[in-house]
Amino acid sequence: MNQTEFEKKVTAYKRERIAPTDGQKLIYLGEVNGLCPLCGKSLVRNGAREVNKFFEIAHIFPCNPTVDDLQQLYGVELYGENSETMHNKIALCKNCHYDYDKNKTKEKYNNLLKIKKNLERVYSVNNELADCNLEDDLRKMLVRLKDLKSGDLNGLSLSYNAVTVNRKIDDTSIILQNKVIGNVILYFKFIQEYLKDLCESSNTDFELVASNVRTVYLKCKRKEMNQEEIFETISNWVVSQTHCSQTAAEIMVSFFVQDCEVYDKLS
């Protein structure tokens, strides 16, 4: 595609600017979790009398590109049906929005587009997970973890040789791999025995309980999330369901990595 063909494509993509509604602004804010995706600053803060907004809705591909924009962005992907769809807009802090508009490069564009696609994927799966409820037995197990004493783990640690995590988590995610292995070595046998006793006392099938987490994992996998995104998303879902600590949620997810409900064996 030459420059002339690209400009024709852009002309077909452009639409007159449409101001986002208040409802759409809330969606954009939720998508970025209230933080600027470029610098991490909070986009909304509580003032003395009202909530102060420190964000603007930015076009990823400009709705009115200049000649320089067209040269800088030659050949890039145009995301969404047109420039005014939600796919082409993102919430940024005012400083990052100004810098992006005034100093646009193909590298910055591709980076922001990649961020947007990742945010959309996470936002979409989080909306799906909002309809999934954590099994009661898993809620009880998280409460038990909160009340755990050091002596409760005596004689229950798992040997490193018994850990199968490195067969499921790629070596490119070594930090995640080490976190999960550490959690599995310390807590796997304790959780396994506790859930076994709990399921027996409540006449619950453990496979049914485990399938609860497996379903959530498959929803994440279907969105083509990478392993770190999946681990973080499931952990955050557990926190949102139970208001437990992030650490407890990660321990529970690590248990199900070892128990094969989260992640598939690497080929």
Image (tube, rainbow, N blue to C red):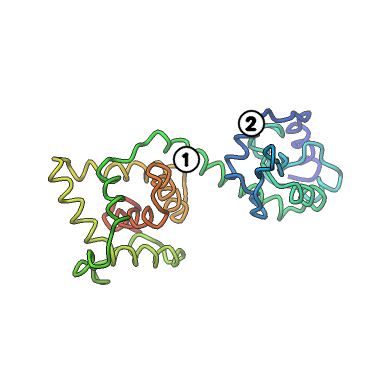
Residue topped by disc 2: 24
- Which residue is pictured at 51% across the width and 44% down the height? 122
Of all residues shown, which one is farthest toward the bottom? Answer: 160
Above or below, comparing residue 227 to residue 153 in the picture:
above
Residue 92: give x, y in percent of width and height: 69, 46
- Which residue is pictured at 30% across the width and 50% down the height? 143
User: What amino acid is labelled 2 in the image?
Assistant: Gln
Placement of the N terminus among the 4 image quadrants? top right
- Which residue is pictured at 17% across the width and 45% down the height? 199
Residue 171: give x, y in percent of width and height: 42, 66
Instruction: Determine whether, in the image, residue 161 is placed left or right of residue 112.
Output: left
Residue 130: image quadrant is top left
Q: Which mark is residue 189?
A: none
Residue 220: image quadrant is top left
Placement of the C terminus among the 4 image quadrants? bottom left
Q: Nearer the viewer, residue 228 or 239?
A: 239
Residue 224: give x, y in percent of width and height: 46, 46
Q: Which mark is residue 126?
A: 1
- Which residue is pictured at 80% across the width and 53% down the height? 103
Of all residues shown, which one is farthest toward the right? Answer: 67
Residue 259: give x, y in percent of width and height: 26, 55
Instruction: Determine whether, in the image, residue 262 is placed left or right of residue 80.
Output: left
Mark 1: few/some/many CA within 10 Å (<14, 14-19, 20+): many
User: What amino acid is labelled 1 in the image?
Assistant: Asn
The reply to whether the C-beta atoms of the residues labelled 1 and 2 are less than 8 Å apart is no
Q: CA distance from mark 1 to mark 2?
A: 17 Å
- Which type of secondary structure does the marked residue at label 1 adopt? helix
